[in-house]
Structures are given as structure tokens and as C-alpha cells.
Amino acid sequence: MIHSKKDYILTTVLFSLGWAFMYADRNILSPIMSVIGEDWNLSKSELGLMSTVFFTTYALMQIPAGFLADRFGRVKILVAGYLLFAIGTFFSGIVSGLGLFLVVRAITGFGEGTYYGPQYAISSETLPKKYRGVSSAIINSGMALGISAGFIASSYLTFTLQKSWQTSFFIFGVFTAIVAVLIGIFIKDDVKKPTVEKEKMEKANLRILFSRNHIFTYILIFCSLYGFFGMLTWLPYYLQTVRGVSGAQTGVISSLVPWASIPGALLFAYISDHIKNKKPLILFLALLGGVCQIVIPYTQNYSLMITGLVIYGMVGKLALDPILVSYVAENTPSVMYSRAYSIFNFAGMVSSIFAPYITGYFADLTGQLEIGFYISGALLFIGGILFLLTNKEPNAVADEEPASAHVPDIAIPNHR
């Protein structure tokens, strides 16, 4: 358990930094896709494939990482993967040609895939329950900082300073390795190795991870992340090629989404921590996010497009995610946190496998990037409406005392 305020702050800051460099790595690529496309003579589908390959291995690693972390130690698995991610980022700037680049991005995805489940398992179990939503929002703010850093650094170094597009990968690869070392040194995980009896009981109750509440949460995170990663992958390219924004400015405009998400995430997480029924808030965020996904490409008014980006940042994935993380914790026994969050993130990241490529495919097919945004908006409407089918009350789980003392008492929800 966290024993002091200093430990609480250190855990929050380091986990936030962890997300910052993960999202910086993912978004280095977006502003320079046009440059890479020209260098290697790539189609839009091939450009989308670079992100799809990364997200495929990232998603495939989610569930194994959760099970390995609960068995062998969350920090050990997290740090090992983070170091692999640092190596992959660095070598992304060394290789030449699409084939080798895809291999390195796949390796990077495997490395990043060990972070989500173990990180949220540690933070959800150790940080104060009454601040669970706000704590998750603060940690998630690292995502926003990383998105902005990736967008701005990549576009600034490449278009303003006229450096090679590989430079950003070198710089972020080195700093990523430093963060991995800091997490390994300062983050402690007090989880004990499960006994044989406890393992049998956990196995018997794994079905709670596929309760009604869990399943519709998985569907919603799938829909939310589809739009989010479709936008992150293609927004700078869309601004450059469709809206006529200069390459140097696309990083700044695209970063409006993550910057707006910080106050939005903190506000809605605070509200979430102080209300019993999270469903209306979750539905509101999902539907408004869907509207923004449609307005951004549809409007011809530049100011309205910017407004749509800002509002989407405030209510989109980065604001919705902490609330869903808290909702999963309410419905899951703490002994299964790593697995629950790994399945949760796997469900979301499956969408990211398809979003970059499908958007590029339809752009090649129709000559319009806008259709990818419209698909994203429609999915958010569907996910939000389906979330209404969750049970009113969360699954009855005990997480105030040591998990081993409560595993036999887990109540499996009645699927009415």
C-alpha cells in the first residue's frame, strides 16, 4: 500500500510520465507521414499500415501481459516491456524501407503492450479509492502531454529546423529508457504471489470479467478508441492535405485535442468520483464525442472545426477513459485488476488495429479522408447506446481489505 503522500505523488507522476512517452512515440509518426510517404513512395493504405502493425502487436500483448504481471510481478513485467519499447522507438529512426520499419514498429508495440494492465492494477489497488477517478485522470494527463509532445516535436524538428524525420525517434527513444529505469527504481508493488488455493478460486471466478457490465464497457472502449486513434493517426495529414494547413502548424493545431483533454478529464473525473451512477455521465461523453467526430470534417468553417477539436478533446477518449477505468474497478475484485484492465484495453486496442488502415483504405477508394471521421462518430453513438444495457448497480466486489480474504465471496451478477 502507499504509505505516504510522497509515495502517492511519486507514483502518480511516474505513471503519468510513462504514458507521456508512450503517446509521444505513437504520435511522432503522424505529422511526418507525408514526408515518409514521399521518401518511400507509399500509398495512403501503406501509411496507415505503419500504425496498424504497431497497434496489432500492442493489442495482442494486452491479455498475456495481465496474466504474467499478476503471476510474476507487475513492476517487473511493466519495466521489461518499457525498455523494449525504448529500443524499438530508437531503432524506428535507424531502419530504412517499409518492411524493416514495420518489423521495428511491431516490436515497439509488444514492448508498450505490457504497460496498461500492470500500471492500472498497481494504481487502482494502492491509490485512495475516493480519489480513484481523479487519480486516473492525472495519470492519463500524461497521454495528453505525450500526444502534444509527439505532434509538436516531430513537426518542429522536421519542418521548422529541417532535421531528418528520424531525429524525433532517436531523442524520444533515449528519454523513454530513462523513464523505464526510474519506474523500476521507485515504483513498488506489494502484491503477493498467489497460493494454489487462491489460484483455483480465481480461476473459478474469471467469468466475472465477462459480466454484463464488463462486456458493454469493453464495447464502449472499442468504439471510443477507434475514433481516437483514427483521428490521431490521420488528423495532421488531413489538415495538411485537405485543409491546406502548413506542416509546421499541424502539430500545434492537432495538439489542441490533448491539451483540452486535461481540464476536461479532471472535471469529469471529479464529477465521477462524487456520483453513484456513472451511466448518464458516460453516455453524455460518448454521444457528444460522436457529434464532434462528425462536425470536425463536415464543417467548412475553420473556426467551427477548431471548436470541434477542442470540445472533442474535453469529452473524448482521454476524458472518458478515467471514468471507465474507475467503473471497471467498481465491478472487479482487486486480485483480478491486471487481467480486467488488460482485457479492457485489449478490447479498445483491437479498434486501433483497424482504424488507421480502414481510414486510409477508404481515402484511397473514395479520394476523401472525411469518411473515416464519420465512421468513428457512428461507432461512438452505437457504443454509448449499448452501454445503457449495463446493470444499474455495479458487480458486488470487495476491495477494501486484502483480496485473498474476499475471493470466496465474489458475487457473480445475475444476467437478466
Image (cartoon, rainbow, N blue to C red):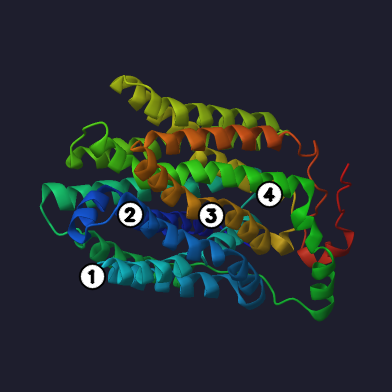
Q: Which residue is mark 1?
A: 96
Query: In the image, 219: left or right of 331?
Result: left
Is disc 3 surrounded by few (<14), some (14 to 19) or many (20+) residues within 10 Å? Answer: many
Residue 275, by quadrant, is top right
Q: Is residue 173 above or below residue 225?
A: below
Q: Earlier in the sequence, mark 1 or mark 4?
A: 1
Label 2 amino acid? Answer: Leu
Q: For the C terminus, give its image quadrant.
A: top right
Label 1 amino acid? Answer: Ser
Q: Earlier in the sequence, mark 3 or mark 1?
A: 1
Secondary element under disc 3, as helix, strand or loop, is helix
Q: Is residue 377 above or below residue 402?
A: above
Label 4 amino acid? Answer: Val
Q: Which residue is mark 2?
A: 47
Name the residue rendered at 42%, 50% in the picture. 356
Distance (Cα) linking label 2 and label 1? 14 Å
Q: Which residue is mark 3?
A: 349
Q: Is residue 309 above or below residue 78?
A: above
Viewer-closest of 147 and 271:
147
Q: Which residue is mark 4?
A: 328
Name the residue rendered at 85%, 67% in the picture. 204
Q: Earlier in the sequence, mark 3 or mark 2?
A: 2
Spot occupied by residue 299 in the image (x, y as percentages of width and height): 37, 21
Spot occupied by residue 253 in the image (x, y as percentages of width and height): 28, 35
